[in-house]
Amino acid sequence: MIKTISTTPYGDQKMGTAGLRKKSQTAMQPNYVENFMQSIFNTIGKLDDKTFLVGGDGRFYNDIAIQKIIKMAAANGVKKLVIGQNGFISTPAGSNVILKNKLDGGFVLSASHNPGGPNGDFGIKYSNQTGGQVPSSVTDKIFENTKNIKEYKICDTADIDLSKLGKQQLCGMEIEIIDPVSGYVDMMREIFDFEAIKQLFAKGFTMRFDAMNAVTGPYAVRIFEELLGAAPGSVVNAVPLPDFGGLHPDPNLVYAKELVDLMFSDNAPDFGAANDGDGDRNMILGKKFFVTPSDSLAILTDNFHLIPAYKNGIYGVAKSAATSTAVGRVAQARNIGYYEVPTGWKYFVNLMDSKRITFCGEESFGTGSAHIREKDGIWAVLFWLNIIAATGKSVEEITLDHWQKYGRSYYMRFDFDGLDTTVADKLMADLEAALPKLSGKTFNGYTVSDAAPFIYNDPVDGSSTKNGLVIKFSDGSRIVYRLSGTGSSGATLRVYLEKYEVEKLREDPQQTLKQILEVAMNIAEITPRTGKLQADVIT
């Protein structure tokens, strides 16, 4: 039943910061998924004692690709696969299964916040035994294997029925189909005060959670409506669809427009939230009020003592370099460990495993803690609900209290999408070469105090990583430039702006950052080089 199939390499199977992401049509090419998976199996080696998780966010082509992975795992001698029922599992739930059950890793099929469907995106995340993303040293070896692959192994058999819970066999490999929701729910109940949140809803508190027709719909209905007592219908777009119902499952002010419009209307509920395609990103809103991911991380960190699982203290907190400095002020005041890492959740894992941090987050709507080794959207939503239940304050009141205590980092991200890769690479290379000459110069009233690439030296494994370019100004403002590694085609230039204020706390962020945006555009020569007069996405 095991066949060895001849194949030829594809040259574009290098993983980005969170796995392999490609257009669906690319992934559907003959042997494309097979080549990639065989390269992973070849890199791991000795599979007869290994157990892996398999699941995904339900996007287009997942069902076919999962069956390929199952048959290839069996043919390559994998001992056991643990698979989410019907092929579904969110990224945070999958991380929990791997970590709690001491599996050897897992494959979560998702392109995260990218759109789905035949003309959308497809992706595969490969996690190691921590339930987190594998390090670059491993992904580099996999990529080298993809460039030289000549054959793959697959079990020639009928598809597996993934709808029935329980155990079965395929070509000598054990398969266990699990409920993807229940274990995750149990974990959340151990962290948060469900009874306090339940009482909050019993008093008439209202919320709207937009699952964006993605994987967290069933998780959200179970937790918020069935267990915590939110009104039926509080969770919308709750049924996962292969094309996400035409939605772009990225929880930000642009793509979650339906939720944003509701929350800024006169009929807004008390609380609003959204998750992305695979459930690891989150957006938090109050009535006519938006909480930036950077502020959210800082607020959660400052209120850790209100959460049962963290009431005895936390080790520390880490943020990506591009994320605002707001959480750094909390860490200093709280006297806890504080780290800045490159963009990419894998850089947090060593810090969590070595008990240097408990919380971590990125500006791209991702926050999480050491309960798993991935960011966790529902975890962040429950954290906010727990704070609201404990303090009796609204989202806006909690945020204003925080600004009055620590000051406010006006902060926004400007994405320039679909750039020619050669143009984007040259822009960054030329900008980096110009950085040493910027120090001391004044642009539109902003004087450069420091300009250099961001370089991270991992305190655990000693590795060094360069990620992005940072320009600091004498008043504490910052510009960060970075090329994104989460797209499926072309290049995205991300420009992050920050201005710190201790008095003017209720200004419009875009107006406050207007001058520094002009500086950022001019220094990098964005318009002349890319032809773009403004950003495609602003968050």
Image (cartoon, helix red, strand yellow):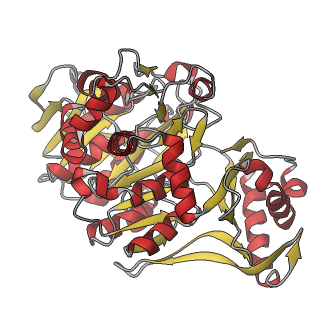
Residue 517 lies left or right of residue 146; in this view the side is right
Residue 215 lies left or right of residue 11; in this view the side is left
Decide which of 17, 7 is in the foreground and name it: 17
Quadrant holding the C terminus: top right
Quadrant holding the N terminus: top left
Residue in the picture at 13% in, 46% down: 79
Picture coordinates of residue 213, whole percent (x, y): 46, 23
Decide which of 379, 280 is in the foreground and name it: 379
Residue 521 lies left or right of residue 335; in this view the side is right
Looking at the image, can residue 55 be seen? yes
Q: Is 477 situated above or below 388?
A: below
Decide which of 509, 532 is in the foreground and name it: 509
Residue in the picture at 73% in, 66% down: 428
Decide which of 105, 114 is in the foreground and name it: 114
Picture coordinates of residue 500, whole percent (x, y): 67, 65
Picture coordinates of residue 7, whole percent (x, y): 42, 43
Looking at the image, can residue 76 be seen? no
